[in-house]
Image (tube, rainbow, N blue to C red):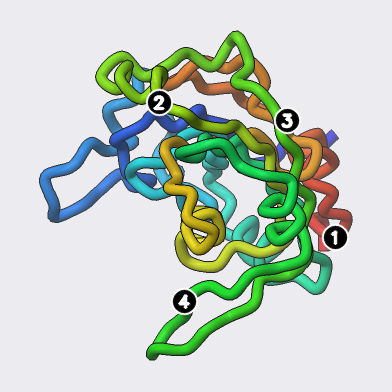
Amino acid sequence: METSPHRYFVLHKPFNMVSQFISPDNVHLLGEIDFPFPEGTHAIGRLDNHSEGLLLLTTNKRVTRLLFQGEKPHERTYLVKVKNVITEESLEQLRNGVLISASHGTWYKTLPCKVILTERPAHIAPRPRYNEWEAMPHSWIEMTLTEGKFHQVRKMVDCLRHRCLRLIRTSIEDLELGTLPPGGVKEYAEEEFFRLLKIDNWRE
């Protein structure tokens, strides 16, 4: 059996870290993660500095095109903590699509998505520096989208006057974060990686 020259990883990106190994800015980088990533490893997609959760890393440069630029949209699920108690009416608005700001002063209506009310899982610890937020009225929701506009989830809840207090990506298709702790890394075999992402044409 031919061995793949590429390697595939899932990282639980911590809060206050950018999705890059190199930056001209004074920020926390992926190179600070205690894991011997091979040369040529790069992130697939981005999570902004204040977002957490599942980040894909690989040495295979084709994955970005296969995952985000293919004809088939791929589901991405996020655990979102919003300020104040959210109503069923607001949840339904999110499900049906809302208007968010886009480039050059334009507006974009988001595609229909899945949204449910939920609770913070026990394995997702509160952020110690933000304990005062735990006492504030808030809601946890789970959102599953098939698109990823710039800061889309944050903009979607903000347009309904619910500030995003915490954003954690928990899965892309069947590839799940699970109980992997912040800073934790899990390596996947090539075939399993693409099977869980539901990418069938990766050998082409």
Front one among 123 and 70: 123
Which numbered marker is on residue 201?
Answer: 1
Task: Looking at the picture, tell me which residue is in the foreground, 7 or 107.
Answer: 107
Placement of the C terminus among the 4 image quadrants: bottom right
- Image check: 196 left or right of 85? right
Query: Residue lying farthest top?
Result: 122
- Look at label 4 and name its amino acid: Ser
Figure quadrant of residue 51: top left
188 w.r.t. 109: above or below: above
Q: Residue 2 carries which label?
A: none
Q: Is residue 192 left or right of residue 11?
A: right
Q: Earlier in the sequence, mark 3 or mark 4?
A: 4
Q: In which quarter of the image is residue 78?
A: top right
* Numbered label attached to residue 136: 2
Residue 134 appears in the picture as rendered: yes
Q: Eyeballing the image, is 18 above or below 192? A: below
Return the mark for residue 189.
3
Question: Could you say whether the residue bearing mark 2 is in a helix, strand or loop?
Answer: loop
Q: Residue 101 carries which label?
A: 4
Of residue 70 and residue 188, the one placed in the foreground of this image is 70
